[in-house]
Image (cartoon, rainbow, N blue to C red):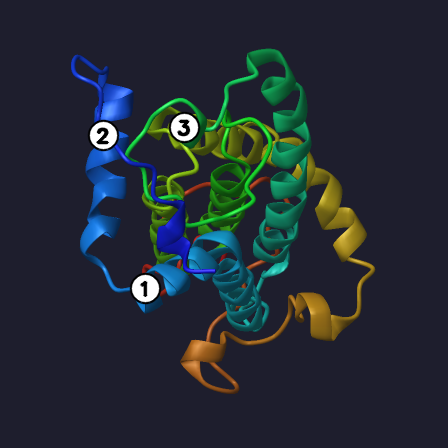
């Protein structure tokens, strides 16, 4: 089925609030894009961007585990998927309480690029999960974290482009995912670090290994592993890693 067959005739209602008008502005771009672009956007918005965040998390783990004292950074990366799962669970009662219909059920003139979308609209699950993952990555590496935050914001934008969420839905998702990941991070990482100390060296790295970026046998004392929750102090040798 051509996704454009789901186009609902009409125009934005006069006097609509900013939440609705911004949705029409973003979703309206789909009026002039080719069908192949819309299919790609639908795949990215539904699966691809979340998958890319997962790949970025693995790449970040592959790098930070080779640095001295990598255990807190690995704990932050482990916390990211757990925070995403908690944000998704926390959203269930929120949706049940708010019971906000999808925008295409209340407003005409939207290009609905995800046929068969059901459930309530507030808060956006995809956005909250993406933001929780991105925050976990940012706690471990500023460089990878900025890329992850960009992907999470693109996920939020895609939900409006696809016509399945209002702007306030994705703003709520950003707030939910970020809040869960940040507020629970100190307790979560403090609990994860002792558990990860028992993990194989290939998983968490060797806290006594020389800095991978200074070359094998790098000079100078190896800093002791940090066990307290991570802080965004930019303390990495190259200004990149937060947990080095």
Instruction: Name the one closer to the observer, 151 or 203.
Output: 151
What residue is drawn where x is 28% and y is 23%? 20
| Cα distance in 3D space between marks 2 and 3 | 12 Å
- Vertical arrangement, residue 71 with respect to residue 207, above or below: above
Looking at the image, residue 77 sits to the left or right of residue 102; the answer is right
What residue is drawn where x is 60% and y is 19%? 94
Looking at the image, residue 75 sits to the left or right of residue 145; the answer is right
Tag 1 secondary structure: helix
Using the rendered image of the protein, determine whether residue 145 is visible from the camera's viewpoint: no
Q: How many marks?
A: 3
Instruction: Name the one closer to the observer, 122 or 154.
Output: 122
Looking at the image, residue 9 sits to the left or right of residue 193; the answer is left
Within 10 Å of disc 3 (Cα), the crowding (few <14, some 14-19, many 20+) is some
What residue is drawn where x is 38% and y is 46%? 162
| Cα distance in 3D space between marks 2 and 1 | 22 Å
Label whose residue precedes the other's in the sequence (3 or 1): 1
Q: Residue furthest right?
A: 198
Q: Residue furthest bottom?
A: 216
| Cα distance in 3D space between marks 3 and 1 | 21 Å
What residue is drawn where x is 50% and y is 22%? 101
Q: Quadrant of residue 233?
A: top left
Please name the residue that numbered disc 1 is placed on. Answer: 35
Front disc: 2 or 1: 1
Please name the residue that numbered disc 2 is placed on. Answer: 22
Instruction: Name the one closer to the observer, 178 or 153.
Output: 153
Tag 2 secondary structure: helix
Using the rendered image of the protein, determine whether residue 204 is visible from the camera's viewpoint: yes
Please name the residue that numbered disc 3 is placed on. Answer: 103
């Amino acid at each position: 089925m051509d996704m454009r067959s789901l186009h609902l005739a009409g125009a934005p209602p006069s006097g609509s609030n900013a939440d609705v008008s911004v949705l029409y502005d973003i979703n309206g771009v789909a009026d002039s894009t080719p069908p192949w672009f819309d299919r790609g956007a639908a795949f990215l918005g539904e699966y691809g961007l979340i998958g890319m965040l997962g790949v970025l998390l693995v790449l970040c783990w592959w790098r930070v585990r080779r640095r001295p004292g990598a255990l807190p950074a690995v704990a932050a990366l482990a916390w990211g998927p757990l925070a995403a799962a908690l944000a998704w669970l926390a959203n269930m009662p929120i949706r049940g309480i708010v019971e906000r219909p999808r925008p295409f059920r209340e407003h005409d003139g939207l290009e609905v690029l995800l046929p068969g979308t059901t459930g309530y609209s507030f808060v956006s699950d995809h956005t909250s999960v993406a933001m929780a993952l991105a925050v976990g990555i940012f706690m471990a590496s500023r460089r990878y974290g900025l890329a992850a935050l960009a992907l999470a914001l693109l996920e939020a934008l895609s939900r409006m482009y696809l016509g399945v969420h209002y702007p306030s839905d994705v703003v709520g998702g950003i707030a939910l995912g970020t809040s869960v990941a940040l507020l629970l991070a100190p307790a979560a990482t403090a609990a994860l670090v002792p558990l990860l100390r028992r993990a194989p060296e290939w998983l968490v790295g060797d806290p006594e290994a020389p800095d991978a970026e200074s070359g094998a046998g790098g000079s100078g004392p190896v800093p002791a592993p940090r066990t307290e929750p991570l802080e965004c102090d930019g303390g990495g040798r190259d200004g990149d890693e937060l947990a080095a």
